[in-house]
Structures are given as C-alpha cells and as structure tokens.
Amino acid sequence: MMNTAQNERQKKAEVVVVIEVAAAARVVVVVVVVVVVVTVVVVVVVVVVVTVVVVVVIVVVVVVVVVIVTVVVVVVVVVVVVVLVECWREGKRESSFENIKKGIITERGTYMLCLRNHWH
C-alpha cells in the first residue's frame, strides 16, 4: 500500500512539475515572440524614417541648387542685356552723321570699345 500511495504521490508531483515546466516554456516562447516582433517593428520604422529623411534632404538640396542656378543665370542674362543695350545706345550716340563723315568714329567701333571697357 505504501508503495502504491508513494507512487501515486510521485506521479502527481511529476505531473505538476511537467505542467509547471510547460507553463514556463509557454511564457518564455511568448516573451521571445514579443521581443522579436517588437524588434522587427522598430527596425522597419527606423528604416522607413531614415529613408524618408534622406529623400526629403535630397529633394531640398536639389530644389536649392536649381533655385541658385536659376537666379545666377537670370542675373547674368540681365547684366549682359543691360551692357549690350547700353553699349548699343552709346554707339548710336557717338557715331553721329557728322563724326562718321569726318571719319572720326564709327558706330561699330564705339560699340566694340564700350564692350571692351565693360568686360575688361
């Protein structure tokens, strides 16, 4: 009888231990799954945020460069047109009919001299 009762208690103790180990194993598995899922989500969010920031920075740099180049080109074109118009007017003014008749000055010569003075 003693042996049977002792065997029964030992079997019950073994079952309790097995149940406790299984419960602990489930908790460990759940914790590991949660940690892996959270890690993957954090990595994906970080990669998306970094990608968006890099794309925004690239777009801003491209827009700034395009604006700067456009402003420089417009300024250069305006300056060239102003100088050309000014020299053309000066050439017209200096090469009056009387001066041309006397051989003193020509419209083209005045224009070229004006351009040379502006660019050098």
Image (tube, helix red, strand yellow):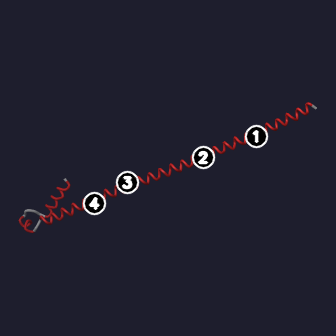
Q: Which residue is drawn at 63% across and 43% down?
A: 35
* Mark positioned earlier in the residue sequence (3 or 1): 1
Q: Do the residues labelled 1 and 2 touch (CB within 8 Å)?
A: no
Q: Residue at x 34, y 58 (%)?
A: 70
Q: In this view, does 25 lie above or below 65?
A: above
Q: In which quarter of the image is the N terminus?
A: top right
Secondary structure of residue under mark 3:
helix
Horizontal side, residue 66 vs residue 81: left or right: right
The residue to which callout 1 is attached is 22
Secondary structure of residue under mark 2:
helix
The tag on residue 77 is 4
Question: In the rendered structure, which amino acid carries the disc numbered 1?
Answer: Ala
The residue to which callout 3 is attached is 65
Real-space Cα distance between discs 3 and 4? 18 Å
The residue to which callout 2 is attached is 40
Q: Residues within 10 Å of mark 1 (few under 14, many from 20)?
A: few
Q: How many dots with numbers?
A: 4
Horizontal side, residue 78 vs residue 29: left or right: left
* Mark positioned earlier in the residue sequence (1 or 4): 1
Question: In the rendered structure, which amino acid carries the disc numbered 3?
Answer: Val
Question: In the rendered structure, which amino acid carries the disc numbered 2?
Answer: Val
Q: In this view, does 9 lie above or below 99?
A: above
Real-space Cα distance between discs 1 and 2? 27 Å
Secondary structure of residue under mark 4:
helix
Q: Do the residues labelled 2 and 4 touch (CB within 8 Å)?
A: no
Q: In which quarter of the image is residue 88?
A: bottom left
